Each structure stands twice: as structure tokens, then as C-alpha cells.
Image (cartoon, rainbow, N blue to C red):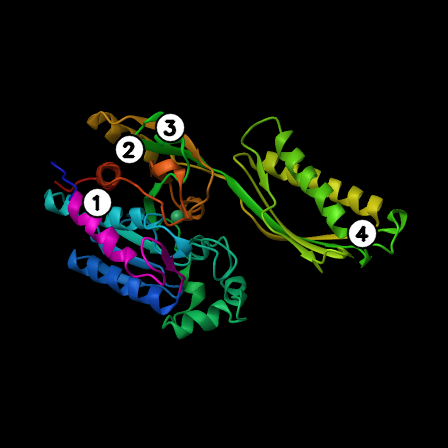
Amino acid sequence: MKLEIDERQLSLEIEALAAISDVEPPAVTRIVFTPTDLKARDWMISRCKEAGLAVRQDAIGNIFARWNGTEPTAPAVGTGSHIDAIPNAGKYDGVVGVLGGLEAIRALQRSGFRPKNSIELLVFATEEPTRFGIGCLGSRLLSGTLSAEAAAKLKDRDGESVDEVRRKAGFNGILQHVKLPKGYYKGFVELHIEQGPLLERAQISLGIVTSIAAPASLRISIEGAGGHAGGVLMPDRKDALCAAAELILAVENAARSSGTVDTVATVGVCDVFPGAVNSIPSRVGMTLDIRDTDLARRDGAMQTIERASRDIAAKRQVSIQSELLNADAPADCAPEVRAALAESCRQHGFSFLEMVSRAYHDSLFISRIAPTGMLFIPCRNGYSHRPDEYAAPDDIARGALVLAESLAKLSGSSQ
Ligand SMILES: [Zn+2]
């Protein structure tokens, strides 16, 4: 089997998809179920049909494009990623895995390969949390990690529910039917830019993911007492921002003292009310994002933060409430998928690094229902989610080639 990736075609397609955006290039904004997103999806479906793939969409808008194997009822081998993009993002996040996956399939077709198990490209709907506040909605539903009932009720900033928004966009199917039956996939591989600097720094062309870190996030509200910055003396204060400051440091300390660098915790939002120079802060709204490769360790750090929060509330006489937004388990990548990726790298003499994915992806959820792996390619300076995100065409093509061979290996040839 002689596989050739059409690097030029792939680059042209990445540019063409990037042009379907709500902002001026090189920035890309493509929020799920907006007219722009729907246009991009139509464009993507046309490319899949041109490649002779059988296309279907489910009730949340996941797109499945299937190259039927000689055993069409056997479990499929899947690949894919997402094409929705946060505001002011770049061209490559998600897109490399979708268009790279399509080109991998086309390269296999051109080589004369005939798959035994069908090979399926999956374009996950609503991976980014921009619209509904939760990431990977499509793959959470596919894997049954989130119930259809809970998903339907999620709302966007305008107060419109997932159910209303998807129906307006033309997806009227039954949300309960999105969940895939057991054994649907024999294996799944997601190609993605690294979104970090390690591969570039080590000058290594490919990363094989060993595990995906477990993310959790919370919304925290602190309620103290406001007052005049001159009139209320220090012993009488219940300053919500001072409590927040202590809590933020407790968060940092919980992650730093876990005994490993794999625990990371971030307070990325801190809204202060009323936010006036001469007024004592009465209320603070914060978010906490905490991740680890080890679930027990992450949950331990969360408990440490919870204890600190109770102590701070008691000491400062403020109320601290937290609401859990999500807490997902980590995923280990499947040995057979990692082996297929590594074997292909070795055959071509491509160097690779075994690494942890610290960002989470649709693969985290697909791993609940199928043996799953991820292949990373370098991106310049590790930049992602910004307009100057960049992956070199030859790196993308190398990723697509290893992906194609791995899909072929997992599917098996009928010849
Ligand atoms: Zn992504």
C-alpha cells in the first residue's frame, strides 16, 4: 500500500474552511448553530460526498461520513474532531482532525485499499463551550456521559435552550437517539494540534497521547457585606474580595502541593461587585478549573480547596457557595490504538513523543465507549485559540499519513 497525502489540497481546504467565519481572517469565529456554522457544515458535507462517503447527521448535529467496508455491519473505525471555533480563534484547532481525517480516507481510497471494517469520519457538534457553557456536548451525548434530558435544558446567553436552538437549525431528531450503541466503534483516533509547546521545543514531529487529563470546573460565589470604604473600620468588615484573594491562593497551593506537576488549578474569572473605588466589595463571582491525570488526586485537591473555603468563610464571616459545572474522569488511551500509531511512525522514521493531553477533547468521551487514541502535531509556539495559531502544512500532512495508516491497520484490509 503506497499512501500519499495531498498536502496542497489539504492546505487549500483548511484555508477555504477558515474563510467561512464571522470575523476577518486570519481570525476565525464559528459558533455552533449560527448561520456561519451551518454554512461550514454544508461545505464539509459536500467535501465528504465528493469523496463518496455516506453522510448522516444526528439530532445534536454530529456528522458521520462513512466509507463502507467489506463487512459493513461490523463495528466501524472512527476518526474526527470538530469545526466549531471560539470567538477570535485560529484555523487549525479541530479542523486539522476533520480535514486531515478526510484526506486520510481519500489517500487510502487512492491507494486502492479496501477496508474490512467501515472507516468513518465524525465531525463532533458543539465541542467548544462558547454557546452552552459546557464543552464536548456532541461527544458527551454520543457516549451517554450526559443525558439527553440534561442536555436539552442547557441554555445559551440569550436564554434559548439547546433543544430550541438545534430545532431552529433544522435538527429535529430525538436527542435520546444520539447515544451510540455499544460496540459501535472498534477503535477511534483523533488527530489534533498539540495546543502546547512541547513538540516544537523538542523538535519532534508527532505526539502519541497516553492519557487525557481529567477536567473539573466550578462556579464560586462569595457574599460578604459592602459599605463605605472610609466609614467601615477594619474590624467590622466582611470583604468578599479579601476572602476571594485567600481562596485563590488556597487553590494555587492545593495544586502546587499535590506532589506532582500534573495537578493544575486556575481561577480565570473574578467579578467584583459593585466594583467601585470607594466601596467595600460585597460580592465576588469566580470560576475554578482544575485538572489532573489522576482522578483521586484531582478530587483530593478539590476537597482541600473545599476545606479551605469553609475555613475562610468562617474566619471572615462571609458565605462561599460553589456549584459544580462538570467533573469528568481522565482517560487512558487504548494500547492497540497507541501501538498502531507508533508502528506507523517507526515505519516512516518519524520521531514521536508519548505525552499527556492536558486539554480535553471529544476523545475523552469517546474513550468511554471505544478504544481511543490521539495523535498530536506541533503548533507554532504552542499557540491555540488565537488568530495566529499555526501548524505547518508538512506537519499536518505527516499527521494525516500516520492517521491513514493507523485507520487502515485498525480496519484491516479485505485483500
Ligand atoms: Zn479542539
For residue 49: magenta? no
Q: Say which of 243 and 43 sits in front.
A: 243
Magenta stretch in the rendered image: 7-32
Can the viewer see residue 341 in this picture?
yes
Mark 4 sits on what residue? 318
Which amino acid, by three-letter code, is at mark 3?
Arg
Residues tagged 4 and 1 counted as in contact (Cβ below 8 A)? no
Q: Position of residue 151 (x, y in %)?
A: 51, 62
Res 353 → quadrant? top left
* Mark 4 residue crowding within 10 angstroms, few (<14) / some (14–19) / many (20+): many
> Who comes first in sequence, dot 2 or dot 4?
4
Circles 2 and 3 in contact, beta carbons < 8 Å: no
Q: Are marks 3 and 1 in contact (CB under 8 Å)?
A: no
Q: Nearer the viewer, mark 2 or mark 1?
A: 1
Amino acid identity at mark 1: Ala
Residue 302 quadrant: top right
Residue identifier under label 1: 104
First in sequence: mark 2 or mark 3?
3
- Residue 340 is labelled as 2
Specify the label residue 201 is tagged with. Answer: 3
